Each structure stands twice: as structure tokens, then as C-alpha cells.
Image (cartoon, grey):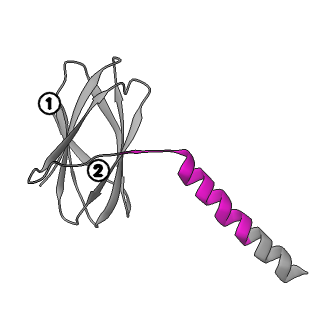
């Protein structure tokens, strides 16, 4: 009985974790062929999560290329959140491991333009 209860609990926990991860959707950022950058233009006033697959030891630059203001709430990679260096209209992050990196970004108007570059 005890084994059955533990097995059921573990299975339920795994399903709940999958549901939570699936609940927060992200927008995949893609780069044009032979380009180091991709971009997004649209409404991010309520916040939007972007996903980008990066290699280890890359410099990720999130740049405001629009007329409004943007705020990068966080960038997280396979090892957790990354620290960024902000200068004027861009913030830079150094990746530690390869894998999906997630960026939560807010704008202050209904139309923002953001550029993502990896070098």
C-alpha cells in the first residue's frame, strides 16, 4: 500500500510539473540564414516570454530597436537566471551552457520592437 501511494504521488507530481511548464508559453526567436540576430515587433505591454536556443559561451544582446521603452525582467538558461549588463538601449548576457534560454520582456506601449543577437 505504501509503495502504491508513493508511486501515485510521484506520478502526479511529474504530471503537475509538466502542466505548469506547458502553461507558460514562449515565442521562439529564429535567426535568418547567415545572421546573428532575430527580432520581434508587437505588443509586449503585458509581458512576453521569448525562447532562444543558444550555445555555451555566447554573448546574448537584447536590444530595444523601437521608439518606446522595454524592460528585460529576466533571462534564464539551463543553469538558472543570468546576470546582465545594461547600457543605454541594450542588455548583454553571457551564456554558460547550451540549451534553451528564456527571456521575459515588457514594453511600455502596445507596439514594441526588440532585437535578439548572439555572438
Instruction: Assign a secondary structure to mark 2.
Output: loop
Is the residue 5 above or below the residue 99 in the image? Answer: below
Taking the image as shown, residue 40 lies to the left or right of residue 90, namely right
- Quadrant where the C terminus is found in the figure: bottom left
Residue 23: where, in percent of width, then height?
Answer: 56, 46
Q: What residue lies at 54% left-to-right and 53% top-to-bottom? A: 21
Question: Which residue is more in the foreground, 49 or 83?
Answer: 49
Occupied quadrant, residue 98: bottom left
* Most distant residue in the front direction: 33
**Residue marked by disc 2:** 83
Does residue 43 belong to the magenta stretch?
A: no
Q: Answer with left or right where residue 31 lies relative to residue 101.
A: left
Question: Residue 106: percent from the left, percent from the top?
Answer: 36, 29
Q: Callout 2: 10 Å neighbours few (<14), some, many (20+)? A: some
Residue plotted at (84% across, 74% down) = 5
List x then y, in percent, for residue 22: 55, 51
Along the line of sight, which residue is nearer the eye, 62 or 73?
62
| Magenta stretch holds residue 25 | yes
Q: Is residue 78 toward the left or the right of residue 57 in the image?
A: right
What residue is pinned by disc 1? 88
In the rendered structure, find residue 70 and report the number of the disc placed on it: none
Which quadrant of the figure has residue 68? top left
- Looking at marks 1 and 2 on the same chain, the residue that comes earlier in the sequence is marked by 2
Labels 1 & 2 near each other (Cβ < 8 A): no
Q: Which residues are magenta?
A: 10-27
Q: Quadrant of the N terminus?
A: bottom right
Amino acid at each position: 500500500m505504501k509503495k502504491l501511494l508513493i508511486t501515485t504521488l510521484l506520478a502526479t507530481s511529474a504530471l503537475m510539473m509538466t502542466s505548469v511548464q506547458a502553461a507558460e508559453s514562449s515565442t521562439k526567436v529564429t535567426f535568418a540564414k547567415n545572421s546573428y540576430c532575430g527580432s520581434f515587433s508587437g505588443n509586449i505591454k503585458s509581458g512576453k516570454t521569448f525562447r532562444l536556443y543558444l550555445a555555451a559561451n555566447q554573448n546574448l544582446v537584447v536590444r530595444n530597436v523601437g521608439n518606446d521603452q522595454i524592460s528585460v525582467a529576466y533571462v534564464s538558461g539551463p543553469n538558472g537566471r543570468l546576470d546582465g549588463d545594461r547600457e543605454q538601449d541594450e542588455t548583454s548576457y553571457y551564456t554558460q551552457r547550451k540549451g534553451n534560454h528564456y527571456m521575459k520582456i515588457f514594453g511600455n506601449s502596445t507596439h514594441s520592437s526588440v532585437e535578439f543577437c548572439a555572438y
